Image (tube, grey):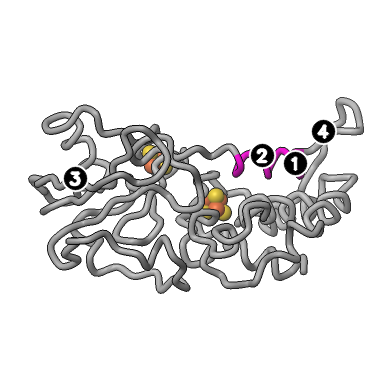
Amino acid sequence: MMFRIARSREGGEINHYDLYKIQTRKGMTVLDALFQIQDKMDASLSFRYSCRGAVCGSCAMLINKEPRLACRTQVSMVIDQSMKLKPFPPIIEVPHGWDKETEILIEPLPNFPILKDLVVDMTKFFDALEELKLWESPTDGDETRIQSPKDRKKIERYVNCILCAICFGSCPVNYEKEEYLGPAALAKAWRFNQDTRNPDAKKYLESAQQPKGTPMCDLIMNCVKACPKGVAPGGAIRKMK
Ligand code: SF4
Ligand code: FES
């Protein structure tokens, strides 16, 4: 199998694409293929990973024009899979010479500045979480705050977020509007608003409803289709709207 991989040696824009031939095996993931390239063909190839098991959220990238986790995407399934995302420039524009039938195309996650090859600068993604103050501040001293399994179940979907930023990278609004806080931060605001242990839940809703938050979302739902953990940020945003 051939891999066509975006390279950016000095950072900034994609500067060219390199082609590599991979020896595939059953169950091989895209991340395994990147290791094979790095170990045997090109030690200069840069990409992020940590857990290799869809837990840390580090290995998000564009695989055949769809944002996916490299560690949970099997090479044998890439060509047949389709998320049916609403198109926007980074997933429409294809590099010259790409043969979709025989090559897997790997590019950095859209909507972020590229640092090198497949590594992007995620500062704005984490800044949005920080800006909305998406954590709980205990106000009741050392008292244990109890939550029933039923109430926990209500926020389960949102707690599962691994902060991979695939939703941010799949969102046409994040592509067009630099200031948009993005689906993950807004879904997390809903998670804290709905958490029954939280004495000050309203503040999360209010901060999510600022102009660059929920009002900016067009409910396109690419985030729902692309999220690898079933968080469905667009559903949370719709409720907040
Ligand atoms: S909501 Fe889904 S896609 Fe977005 S950061 Fe969390 S896990 Fe990733
Ligand atoms: S390496 Fe951790 S999510 Fe892929």
Q: Is residue 157 visible?
A: yes
Q: CA distance from mark 2 to mark 1?
A: 6 Å
Q: Quadrant of residue 180?
A: bottom right
Q: Which residue is mark 2?
A: 127
Q: Which residue is mark 1?
A: 131
Q: x and y percent of residue 34 in the render?
A: 23, 40
Q: x and y percent of residue 33 in the render?
A: 20, 43
Identity, as a three-letter code, of the amino acid under mark 3: Asp
Identity, as a three-letter code, of the amino acid under mark 4: Thr
Q: CA distance from mark 1 to mark 4?
A: 27 Å
Residue 18 - label = 3
Q: x and y percent of residue 126 in the render?
A: 62, 39
Q: Earlier in the sequence, mark 3 or mark 1?
A: 3
Q: Earlier in the sequence, mark 4 or mark 3?
A: 3
Camera-side mark, 2 or 4: 2
Q: Which residue is mark 4?
A: 144
Instruction: Say whether marks 2 and 1 touch (CB < 8 Å).
Output: yes
- Ligand 2 occupies quarter: top left
Element at label 3:
strand
